[in-house]
Image (cartoon, helix red, strand yellow):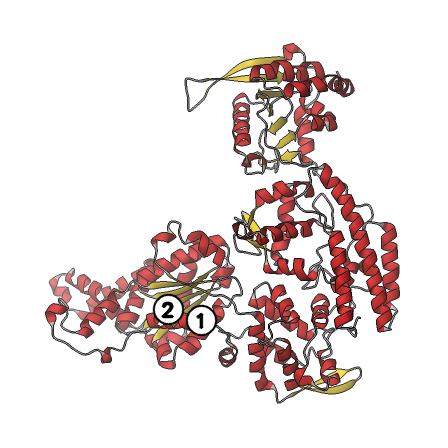
Amino acid sequence: MDADKAYQNWLKHKDSIIALAHETINESDTRLRIIDTILIDILGWPKGSINTELSIGTKEEETHKSLYLDYVMQSDINYYLIEAKKTGRYFSVPNGYKKVFKSERGILTSHLNNKDFMNQGINYMNKLGTPFCVLSNGLQFIVIRRKRALDANDVIVFRDADDIETRFIDFYDILGPGTNGLEKIDQILSTPDEIRNKPAFNKKIYDNLYNNNDQVKHSDASIVTQNYISTFFGDLNNNSELLKDCYCDPTGRFTTFANGLKNQLLSRPLESIKRLTVKDKFGDFGNFEDKYKYELDQQNGAVFVLVGGVGAGKSTFVEHFYNFELDETNRKDLIWINFNFLDFTKAPDKVDEFITEEIIKVLKTDKYKNLELEKWETLEKMYSSEIEQLKQSLPPHLRSKEDVVSEKAWAFIEEQKKEHYESHLEKQFAFIKETLNKKICFVFDNTDQKHFEEQNSVLMNAFKRAKRYGIIIITSLRLENYFLIKDRPPFDAYHFFTFRIEPPKLKELLYKRLQASKNYSTGMFNIDYNGKVIKVPVEKFVNLLSNTFDTSNSDNQVEELFESVSGGNMRRGLILFKKYIQSGHNRLYEKINLIKNIDNAKVEFNEAFDSLVRGDNVYYSSLDTAIENLFLIEDDGFYSHFTKIYLLKFLYERYSSKINDGYVLLDDLYEKFTPCFSNYEKMIEILKMMLKNFLIESDYGERDKWFTTKSVKISFLGQYYMESILVNWNYYKYILIDTPITNPSKYKILNRNFQKIEKIYNHNAKTKKIVENIEIFLEYLHACEQEDYALLDSRGGVPIKPIMEELIKDVRVSVLEEQKDNPKVLVD
């Protein structure tokens, strides 16, 4: 029987099969009345090729219970088993078009019933040795291939009668007696499970621009202001004076914590302790001083953990603490060793080795030469008890010979240094504490920028070293990781002090640095502008930027823009601010010369937005910008302009409803958006891009590593896109040229209009033409969305309503508001 004849048989029997499947019949009737019909009457299996109730031994955990297979199908070229379930025992298959899944840790196996059924089929398949197995309740067919290491997916699903009919050729080729089912399965599993073909036409206006990658508009003042910018808006940790002036602690919380840390690090002066002779009060100690020394010796150390996001200011806090919370006397009596874990590039199990190597290296530097740790007299003191024991082990006639004793002691100590260096380090730190009366503090810096396993390994090492050496260790954790481990073994067995470092508002940070930079304000920026040199007083330059980021102004669009785009990361915020100052589009220097009342002037939102969007580029490019184009078409199998926006909108609504703090499990997200992705991995790739670009947050906490991420939520920046950027017409005038257009006629119109706009110099005429082109672009997106939704609805739909109609209204409102509030806005 060929596939065409089998299909005619399917049409003949389909209605009766569906009717039976909706009755409540047991497993035996399901097999006899439905599955037998499909196998014999439709697919054409000879009865002699079907083996039923085949015994394959017993359950390993229930040795007295025999196992019987429902069907074993074997022809000359096809071989598989079928396990039948009664009607009504449905497999939980996600809605949508998707036909291939994973049998392990996938969305299909997240449902308990599915997992039990599938495990049973896989177990039977492994026992019998068939290349694949089939699970069926009469209408649903789950095909599971024997697992291979290279297979991403190993399950093919036929959801129902309609799915079987739509894909009958695949159904027949897998299950028919005259076909090689395994070969067909491998072909399906290896073929991209795409929803639709890639757009045949896919062009950007940007691609046709003359030398679009070479035309870069550099700021006329970028070189002149480079020293100023590097000095005041770079890393201050190597510039102690500027660190003091620019340190930002608006609430005073950092100071409170610093005082607590300082009390742990600094011993009370022994001279202030009065002697007493009340022996019974202190046991064996005759005075306060002895008691105090004893307690110092018994200290087991302490671990301080700074908790916060990457770029929150943890390293800056530590640097400021050392330089300004401690005075010169404090620092003199403190051994302070900083370990930069950005230099650590080995596996997590090498953390201990890395720390030891760094300690050895630091203690040998000139900074600690005065400790004389390698001097023989010092080593004698460190190992005094061991040397005494060694001396007592010598024959009496050798004990009195100092040269013999010294030689053996030296050999013993050298062996300790080579073979037991960790113990030797413990001796050194004990000597520093007890004999030299110094405190010791390790700083494990930038550990929060390492992945989860490395952070855990560093923290465990901190506990071990703090206890072993009796020292203070300061380390850091990302906030998410701290919440993951704090109540779990083995971390719940350790006591450590925690302090949450919350970054200041970016405007507070920038305003503080701008005020500090007024020390630079006596100079001039001599700028070559349009062929002539203009002198721009630094003071006016600073005033303009200070007014823009004035902390007393609660309603500031520019501050909100920078705050949002920085994503709460102060390092990123400073980088963006530096790029903004040096952008060829910011017009700061022109503005300073044109505005008479510069003391009250500030940068307008559109001016700042234009600089962030384009940077030094003449045209917007999604490859080089701080503002992302959310309408790009991704390689996700659906090829839509809206995939990222729909994900963001759903996460935005989930966050607004305050369910689980806005976090959504990845499996749940995929189940809801299955029609938008050819497979689970495609969704993860999109989410990884969104995470790296600060649009979403991961429960794992990293941006460059996905690792153990199980759920995500919308970020502060993602919310800003939904609330502010997507509804602003300026956004579309930039991204329009870098968005792929799949409609040839629309592309032709948009491109022609853009070329005309380039030649218009009248402000009003240019603005009007830009708005007209944006309208055409939005109408194109609207038409694309309607086409997308027709397909999405046929595949089960997504939990988001279409957005373009409402978005078009909002964008039109933004045009009217800008014309009303700022009619003279400059449009390039």
Residue 42 on image: x %, y % = 71, 17
Q: Residue at x 15, y 70 (%)?
A: 285
| Mark 2 Cα shell of 10 Å, populated few (<14), some (14-19), many (≥20) | many
Left or right: 283 as drawn, with respect to 259: left
Residue 760 on image: x %, y % = 88, 70
Secondary element at image label 1? helix
Q: Nearer the viewer, residue 457 or 563?
A: 563
Q: Residue at x 55, y 25 (%)?
A: 121
The quarter of the picture where residue 560 lies is: bottom right
Q: Nearer the viewer, residue 465 or 629?
A: 629
Whether pointer 2 and pointer 1 mark residues with C-beta atoms closer than 8 Å, the reply is no
The mark total stands at 2
Left or right: 26 as drawn, with respect to 376: right
Judging by the rendered image, the residue that carries numbered circle 2 is: 441
Q: Amino acid at mark 1?
A: Phe
The N terminus is located in which quarter? top right
Whole-number angstrom distance, CA of label 2 to CA of label 1: 19 Å
| Mark 1 Cα shell of 10 Å, populated few (<14), some (14-19), many (≥20) | some
- For residue 254, the mark is 1
Q: Amino acid at mark 2?
A: Cys
Residue 350 on image: x %, y % = 44, 55
Left or right: 521 as drawn, with respect to 422: right
Farthest residue in the top direction? 48
Up/down of 524 relative to 168, above or below = below
Secondary element at image label 2? strand
